[in-house]
Amino acid sequence: MATPEGPARTTVTQPDGIPVGLLVLGHGAGGLRWTDDVTASRDAAVDAGWTVALVDQPWRVAGRRIGGQPASLDRAWLAVLPTLHAHRPNGGPLVVGGRSAGARVACRTAAAVGANAVLALSFPLHPPGRPERSRGEELREPGRHGITVHVIQGVSDPFGTPEEVREVLTGAAVHEVAGTHSLERSAALVATAVTSALSRC
């Protein structure tokens, strides 16, 4: 589908029966494939009755291996989200999220797209070894609009541990799982945490 940054792609998976709500997930800033933690999250959400849309940013559709600047990612995301409302059941919640850079996009735009909650996998709170370069304002942005943020974070994530996330996001629902910034080896644990988070949306 067309966006100001070039064509994006969505892949929608429907549950059996009437959906509970719509979950929209974005990917990280590198690589051309969906990681196991995201696909496990999709499968768990579908099993729980949610429609799930995976959004490929234009840079990835074009075959580039590195993502663009935050503003360009936001523009593409904001162009795609309205096209997905047909998959949202009447009155059902809209949850937006993604892993790493995708989680940042979801946080920055949650209010603009009318989200009920954000699901952040491996939120990159700061560059490794640079806690002074915090992206805490992005993580707090949804809460300023009454939007709950659920964070699933690896206990040894060099981009921000669960404890660092809690310090920035007081009262947040932070789910700790084994792993670093990559949670592929903990995909089953991530799926369980996603199911728990969605049950509260």
Image (cartoon, rainbow, N blue to C red):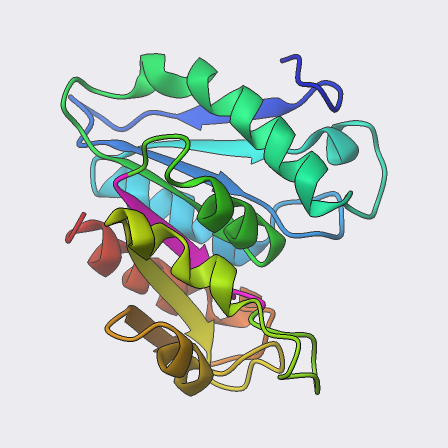
**Image check: 35 left or right of 117?**
right
| In magenta stretch: residue 25 | no
Q: Residue at x 59, y 72 (%)?
A: 181
**Image check: 143 left or right of 100?**
left
Q: Residue at x 40, y 41 (%)?
A: 110
**Image check: 80 left or right of 200?**
right
From what the image shows, is residue 130 above or below residue 118?
Answer: below
Q: Quadrant of residue 51?
A: top left
From what the image shows, is residue 19 above or below residue 137?
Answer: above
Residue 194 coordinates in the image, percent (x, y):
31, 56
For this rendering, which residue is in front, 47 or 97?
A: 97
Which portion, as a residue range, is magenta?
116-124
Among all residues in the image, which is located at the extreme front?
144
For this rendering, which residue is in front, 114 or 6?
A: 114
Residue 172 coordinates in the image, percent (x, y):
28, 69
From what the image shows, is residue 85 above or below residue 113?
Answer: above
